[in-house]
Image (cartoon, grey):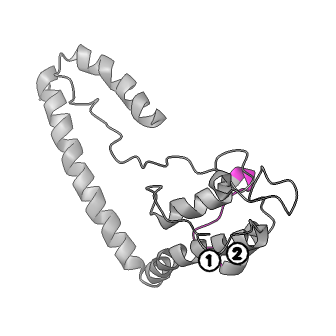
Amino acid sequence: MQHLELSRVIARPLERAVRARRGILSGAQAAALSPTPRIMGLDGQAKMSKSMGNTIGLLETPEQIWDKLRPAVTDPKRVKRTDPGTPEVCNIFSSAQIIQSGGNGRGTSPFSAARPDGDASTANACCTRTWCRELTPIQARAKELREKPKLVDDALARGTAHCREIAKKTIGEVRERMGID
């Protein structure tokens, strides 16, 4: 969002200078934002961040994911093992639900039947299974693209050509309004 707003701030004076209609340059919109723009990190203190080391990588193995989730605190309100669990407030639960839902935040509970007693190890194991299941297709596609780099090169070339056409049209409109041939 900050980058889109910065582009609008930069474009507005240029549009005024060339007396261009609004939207030639400053029409960038954030239409593709998901309902879950921020996922809390494994520490539950801040958003996921590689620099803070509180993330799960898309290409991590099930063992690596389990190593990160096993010690994670699943319920900040649960002080003793005998306290009832409330997975709704658990950042690990929330992250598994988000990834399971494809980012729309409406996934089903990864703990639905597996956590009647609020057991943290059961909860972490359920989350690990959810993460691994949801990441499997991403990891398979990444493997395929590593084995066929031409697919990536072709996609980048198509994207570049498409963006050049859009930029050429926009620059043409700006040059026309400025009276530059």
**Could you tell me residue 63's position as x and y percent?**
72, 80
**Could you tell me residue 117's position as x and y percent?**
74, 68
Mark 1 secondary-structure assignment: helix
Q: Quadrant of the C terminus?
A: top left
When asked about the image quadrant of residue 118, the answer is bottom right
CB of mark 1 within 8 Å of CB of mark 2?
yes
| Residue at the spot of label 2 | 125
Q: Which mark is residue 16?
A: none
Q: Is residue 98 above or below residue 172?
A: below
Residue depicted at 65% across the width and 79% down the height: 61
**Could you tell me residue 172's position as x and y percent?**
15, 35
User: Looking at the magenta stretch, what is its main secondary structure?
Assistant: loop
Instruction: Tell me where the magenta segment starts and ends, as one range.
Output: 51-61
Residue depicted at 76% across the width and 59% down the height: 84
Q: Is residue 131 above or below residue 50?
A: below
Residue depicted at 61% across the width and 74% down the height: 113
Is residue 181 found left or right of 27 in the rendered image?
Answer: left
Mark 2 secondary-structure assignment: helix
State yes or no: residue 110 in magenta. Answer: no
Q: Amino acid at mark 1?
A: Arg
| Residue at the spot of label 1 | 129
When asked about the image quadrant of residue 161, the answer is bottom left
Q: Amino acid at mark 2?
A: Ala
Residue depicted at 58% across the width and 64% down the height: 96
Q: Quadrant of the N terminus?
A: top left
**Could you tell me residue 105's position as x and y percent?**
48, 55
When asked about the image quadrant of residue 42, the answer is bottom right
